[in-house]
Image: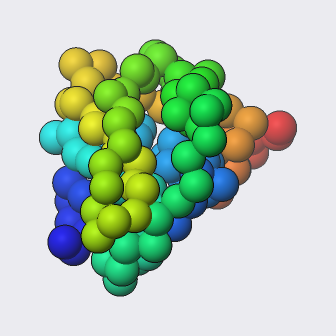
Amino acid sequence: MKESEKIEFKKSPGEWKEIVETVCAFANTEGGKSYIGVSNSGKILGTNIGKSTIEDLTNKIVNNTEPKVYPKISTEKIENKDVIVIDVAKSVTNLFLPLEDHLIPLLQKHSSGLNT
């Protein structure tokens, strides 16, 4: 398995901000899958999946996208290790991330005279 326009790897659910960004990017393009518990090189690391891990990750995605994204999240055993798979469909409308984390810094870079 390799990363591509439709496949993204993250080492752990702790990288949730990057996971939300990836979900948003997939939804704004053709969709895709994120594999959590896989290194950037494609090495299967596995991840600890507690009883609230999937729910917490789902809530972070839903609460940090506009309009809300409800991806399909499942677990798979790959090379005998637990991996979380986030399957994101293409969105019919463009999504964006919350202003405080992403859009304001982007606007500050690209707009002169904007005071925030």
Camera-side residue of 91 and 48: 48
Q: Residue furthest right?
A: 116
Q: Position of residue 113 (x, y in %)?
A: 74, 45
- Residue 30 visible, this orientation: yes
Q: Position of residue 99 (x, y in %)?
A: 67, 33
The C terminus, quarter of image:
top right
- Quarter of the image for residue 73 reads top left
Camera-side residue of 3 and 43: 43
- Quarter of the image for residue 109 reads bottom right
Q: How many marks overall?
A: 0
In the image, is residue 89 above or below residue 50? above
Q: What residue appears at the point 23 percent right and 45 percent down from the top-left corner?
A: 32
Task: Look at the image and name its color scheme.
Answer: rainbow
In the image, is residue 59 above or below residue 8? above
> In the figure, is residue 66 to the left or right of 30?
right
Q: What residue appears at the point 16 percent right and 40 percent down from the top-left corner?
A: 30
The N terminus, quarter of image:
bottom left
> In the figure, is residue 73 to the left or right of 28?
right
Camera-side residue of 24 and 81: 81
- Residue 107 visible, this orientation: no
Camera-side residue of 52 and 36: 52
Q: What residue appears at the point 57 percent right and 26 percent down from the top-left corner?
A: 55
Q: What residue appears at the point 62 percent right and 41 percent down from the top-left corner?
A: 50
Q: Residue furthest front?
A: 80
Q: Position of residue 41 (x, y in %)?
A: 35, 83
Q: Position of residue 76 (x, y in %)?
A: 31, 49
